[in-house]
Image: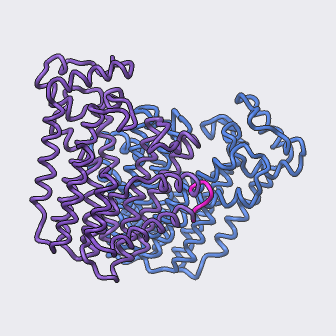
Chain colours: A purple, B blue
C-alpha cells in the first residue's frame, strides 16, 4: 500500500473535488454493507472499515481527471464496486490461508468461520455488480467482470503452480497481472470511461502499476522485516508460492533451484531460504525490475492535463515508496 | 429436480425452437468453461457437465415465450449466466459441506481441494456477469446481481439461524426465497425481458416455483428414502439446518420443540428424529403447503399465449412430481 503521506500529497495536488469523492465512496461502502442483513453488516462492514488506503478508488477518481460534476455518481459507484471486489477477494483469501489477522484486525474467517466468510465474500462480489448495474453503464460491468474473472484465474494459476520452484518468469508475471494488475487496470478504465479520457492507455497504466505493486509485495515477503510487514519472512515460500526473488536467485545459486519447498516445515526454515535468496543479490534485482515497470507505466501515460498526469505519477511513486 | 420425463414433455409441447436453444446453451457453457485456463476447464467444466436437468435455463426460454429469433442470442447468454451462478453456488456449497459427491460425481473440493474449489466458484460467478455484460443489456445484469446477492444473503441467514430449533416459519420461508426462489425468479425475469413479456408477473411465478422446489427438497431430506435422494435422511438436521418438516412437527410434538440439534452425533440419531417428525404427520402437511405454493404460482400466471402458459404449468407440475 502506498503510504498515507503520499496519498495526502495526491489529495492536495488533485484539489478539493477528490477529497469529496473519497468521502462519498466511504459513505457508499458503509451504506452498501449495512443494507443486506446483520451478518454482512457485521463482517462485510468490518472488512471494509478495516480498510487500507483505498488505492483502487483513488485510481478511479484520478483516471477520471477533471470529470464533469455529473459524472460524480458514476465514479462513486465504480470506486465502490472496485473496492468491494478487492474486499471480497481478501475475505476469500483469508479463508483459504486460514489467516487470523489482516491489517491488525481479526479476519472474518477467524471471527465467524469458513462458511460465513465464504458467503460474505460472495455477497460483497454480488453487491459490486449490483452497484454498477444500478448505474446502468454496461461498459462498466464489462470492465469489472473482466477484472473479477482475472482475479480468480490468477488465484487458480497460483495454486496450479504451487511448489514448483522452476515456474517460468513469464508465467509468474502473467499471474501477477491477473491477480493484482487486472483490478488496478479496471479502476483506471472505469475512471477513464466516466471521465471521457483515453481508456485503453489509462487501463495499461493501471495494469503496470498493479504489476509493480505485486512485485514489490513479493520482495517484501522475502526481505521483511516482520516488524514492518506484520508477518514472518517467507510466508509465500511456506505456501508453496514461488515469486520473483526466488526466480531471480535460482539463476544465481543452483542450490536454490533445487530447493524442495514442500520440505520447508517451519518459519525458521523459510527464513533461512530468504537469507540465501538475499545473499545472491536477487532482492535488489527484483526491486530494480519493479522500478522499471513503474517507469514504463509513467512513460506510457498518454497526453493528459498537467494536474491529472502529476497526480497519477504521484500514485506510481507511492507504489515504489512503500518499499523504500 | 423435475424428472427427465417431464422435461421431455415440456420440450415436446414447446416446439423445436426450445430444443435448439437448449443445445445452444450447452455449447455456450462448454465454451465458457473451456476458455479460461486449464483448471477452470477441468473443474468448472466437470461441474457444468455433471449438470442436472438445466431447469433454470429452461425457465429462461419458457418465460421468453415465442420470442423473435433475434432475441435468441440474448436468451442463450441469460440462460448460460443463470446456470453459471447456480454452478458457482454448488461448488462453494460443496466446499463448505466438505461434500465428496454431487450427482454421483466427485466434487471439485474433493478432487482439487478447498482453494481451487473456492477460486473455481469465484471464476464461474465472474464469467456469469461477463457473459451478460458482453450482451450489453444492463437490465439483465441487474436481475442477475440481485439474485446472486440473494443467494449469498440466504446462505448467511441459514448459518445465522443454524441449530435454532425455534426459528420462526416466516424466517424459514424468507431464507428459502433467498436461497432458491431468487435464481428461479431471475431466470423468469431474464426470459421475459428478452421476450418482451410481463416481467414482474413471470418473475413472481419463478420465485414461487423456486420456493416450492426448496420446500419439497427439505421434505425429501426428512422422508428419504436414501436410495432416491442419494444421501442419508436428516443431513440437514446434522448440519443444524431447521426446515419446514421440523417447524410443523414441533407444534404437534412438544418434545420435538425441545430437541437439541447439537446433540445429534450420528446419522442414526438424525434418522430417529426424522422418524419422530414423520410420526406427527408433518411431512404430509409440509408437502401440502408446497403444493399450495405451486397452485398459487400457476393461478398467478398472467395472460399469456396458450402454448407458453401450458409449458410453464408443465414445469410447475414437474417440481411437484419429483416428490411423488
Residue at horizontal 72 percent and vertical 43 percent from the top:
B163
Where in the figure is residue A81, as x and y percent of width and height?
Answer: 40, 63
Q: Is residue A17 above or below residue A318?
A: below
Residue at horizontal 71 percent and vertical 61 percent from the top:
B291
Q: Is residue B260 above or below residue A70?
A: above
Residue B93 in view of the camera: no
Left or right relative to B221: residue B98: left
Nearer to us in this view, A127 or B94: A127
Where in the figure is residue A15, as x and y percent of width and height?
Answer: 29, 73
Residue interval drawn in magenta:
A35-40
Left or right relative to A126: residue B322: right
Nearer to us in this view, A131 or B286: A131
Residue A82 in view of the camera: yes
Residue at horizontal 19 percent and vertical 27 percent from the top:
A166
Question: Does the segment drawn in magenta span residue B40?
Answer: no
- Dividing the picture into quadrants, the one containing residue B277 is top right
Nearer to us in this view, A238 or B102: A238
Nearer to us in this view, B302 or B97: B97
- Dividing the picture into quadrants, the one containing residue B196 is bottom left
Left or right relative to B33: residue A31: right
Q: Is residue A278 above or below residue B7?
A: above
Where in the figure is residue A44, as x and y percent of width and height?
Answer: 52, 54
Question: Does the segment drawn in magenta span residue A37?
Answer: yes
Count of number-bearing discs: 0
Where in the figure is residue B194, as x and y percent of width and height?
Answer: 41, 75
Amino acid at each position: 500500500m502506498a503510504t498515507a503521506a503520499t496519498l495526502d500529497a495526491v489529495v492536495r495536488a488533485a484539489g478539493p473535488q477528490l477529497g469529496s469523492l473519497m468521502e462519498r465512496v466511504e459513505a457508499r461502502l458503509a451504506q452498501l454493507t449495512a443494507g443486506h442483513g446483520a451478518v454482512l453488516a457485521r463482517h462485510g462492514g468490518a472488512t471494509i472499515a478495516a480498510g487500507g488506503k483505498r488505492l483502487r478508488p483513488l485510481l478511479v477518481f484520478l483516471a477520471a481527471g477533471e470529470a464533469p460534476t455529473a459524472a460524480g455518481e458514476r465514479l462513486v459507484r465504480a470506486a465502490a464496486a472496485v473496492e468491494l471486489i478487492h474486499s471480497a477477494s481478501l475475505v476469500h483469501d483469508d479463508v483459504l490461508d486460514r489467516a487470523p489477522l489482516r491489517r491488525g484486525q481479526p479476519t472474518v474467517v477467524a471471527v465467524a468461520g469458513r462458511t460465513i466468510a465464504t458467503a460474505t465474500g460472495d455477497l460483497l462480489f454480488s453487491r459490486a455488480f449490483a452497484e454498477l448495474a444500478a448505474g446502468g453503464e454496461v461498459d462498466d460491468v464489462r470492465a469489472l467482470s473482466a477484472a473479477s474473472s482475472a482475479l480468480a484465474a490468477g488465484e487458480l494459476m497460483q495454486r496450479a503452480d504451487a511448489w514448483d520452484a522452476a515456474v517460468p518468469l513469464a508465467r509468474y508475471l502473467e499471474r501477477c497481472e491477473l491477480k493484482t494488475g487486472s483490478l488496478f487496470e479496471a479502476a483506471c478504465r472505469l475512471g477513464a470511461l466516466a471521465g471521457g479520457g483515453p481508456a485503453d492507455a489509462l487501463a495499461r497504466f493501471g495494469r503496470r502499476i498493479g504489476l509493480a505493486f505485486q512485485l514489490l509485495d513479493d520482495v517484501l515477503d522475502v526481505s521483511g522485516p516482520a516488524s514492518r510487514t506484520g508477518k514472518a519472512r517467507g510466508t509465500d515460500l511456506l505456501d508453496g508460492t514461488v515469486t520473483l526473488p526466488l526466480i531471480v536467485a535460482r539463476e544465481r545459486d543452483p542450490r536454490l533451484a533445487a530447493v524442495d519447498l514442500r520440505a520447508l516445515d517451519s518459519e525458521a526454515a523459510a527464513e533461512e531460504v530468504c537469507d540465501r535468496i538475499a545473499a545472491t543479490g536477487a532482492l535488489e534485482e527484483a526491486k530494480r525490475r519493479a522500478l522499471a515497470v513503474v517507469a514504463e507505466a509513467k512513460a506510457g501515460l498518454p497526453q493528459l492535463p498537467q494536474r491529472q498526469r502529476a497526480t497519477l505519477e504521484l500514485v506510481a511513486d507511492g507504489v515504489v515508496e512503500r518499499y523504500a
